[in-house]
Image (cartoon, helix red, strand yellow):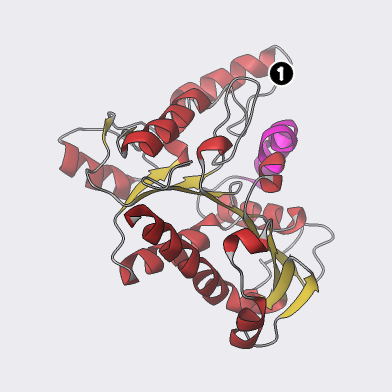
Amino acid sequence: MSKKHPIVAVTGSSGAGTTTVKRAFEHIFHRDNISAAVIEGDSFHSYDRATMKAEMAAFAKRGESLSHFGPVANRFDLLEELFREYGETGCGKKRYYIHSDEEARQLNARLGTSLNPGEFTPWEDLPAGTDLLFYEGLHGLVVTEDSNVAQHVDLGVGVVPIVNLEWIQKIHRDNLERGYSAEAIVDTIMRRMPDYIRYITPQFSLTDINFQRVPTVDTSNPFIARDIPTPDESFVIIRFKDPKKLQIDFPYLLSMIHDSFMSRRNSMVVPGGKMGFAMEIILQPIIERMMDARRV
């Protein structure tokens, strides 16, 4: 952890909604003129898309499973090294995992490469003189026998829909955006489950703040749900690990967020449609205090 070069990590599994939190942070950085070194968790996968498929097939032949949730498919050592180096010096290396044709065109134009979706860009230096490092992905606070990424994080934020809602979001995204069949998506969920339990879930006990969306409609069987519950059909439970440390002003938050209420001494509940707004008014003062500490 570092006051001079702080690290903010947003962690959550695929389809959980980390993009919503990322957007809230982008608004905060823009308003406060904060320069952030942005790191995407996918860039620390061990394999490109083609190699991952081959490795998965090899594991399956041995009766074993391989998923992007676990340590074999990720370079936790390099992620921890980046966090350590940035915390000490404000420097480090990054790369991109290319998800789409549009990303490929943009990155190839900037880097002078001819890469395709599913491949990695070359490693490059982080921008000089950034105010903080912002990570968004699967493993921002992962801890294993060999790596402890969480120890370097100054602010950890978890995005954790209840698991049935998470599955519904993943099923719909993978079907509509990637063309996967329902059977293939269910197989992926089953294959990932052991790694999800071992390496994803424990991170949410280490986060400083968790945002958990809970639907108010029936999601008993996520595999037959025809649509994703809307924000207005849900609540968001916001849990603070140590409200005193974060200087959380609950009376102020309750007055600002209509129809919010306290469910425990360190947890508040807000309407689902207020999730983005709640994130910004909660997180902005925390980030501003981090920036003030840098100047001391």
Apparent side of residue 175 relative to residue 104 in the rendered image (left or right): right
Q: Position of residue 124 (x, y in %)?
A: 25, 32
Q: Is residue 190 magenta?
A: yes
From the viewer's side, name the closer residue of 83 and 49: 83
Give amino acid for label 1: Glu
Name the outermost residue toward the right: 220
Q: Which residues are magenta?
A: 181-201
From the viewer's side, name the closer residue of 226 and 273: 273
Apparent side of residue 73 relative to residue 28 in the rendered image (left or right): right
Q: Is residue 7 magenta?
A: no
Q: Quadrant of the rendered structure where residue 58 is?
A: top right
Mark 1, residue position:
64
Looking at the image, which residue is at 61% across and 46% down? Answer: 13
Task: Kindly report the secondary structure that dominates the magenta region of the rendered protein.
Answer: helix
Looking at the image, which residue is at 62% across and 30% down? Answer: 67
The quadrant the C terminus occupies is bottom left
Within-10-Å neighbours for mark 1: few <14, some 14–19, many 20+ = few
Whether residue 73 appears in this view of the structure is yes
Q: Position of residue 127 (x, y in %)?
A: 24, 43
Q: Quadrant of the rendered structure where residue 255 is?
A: bottom right
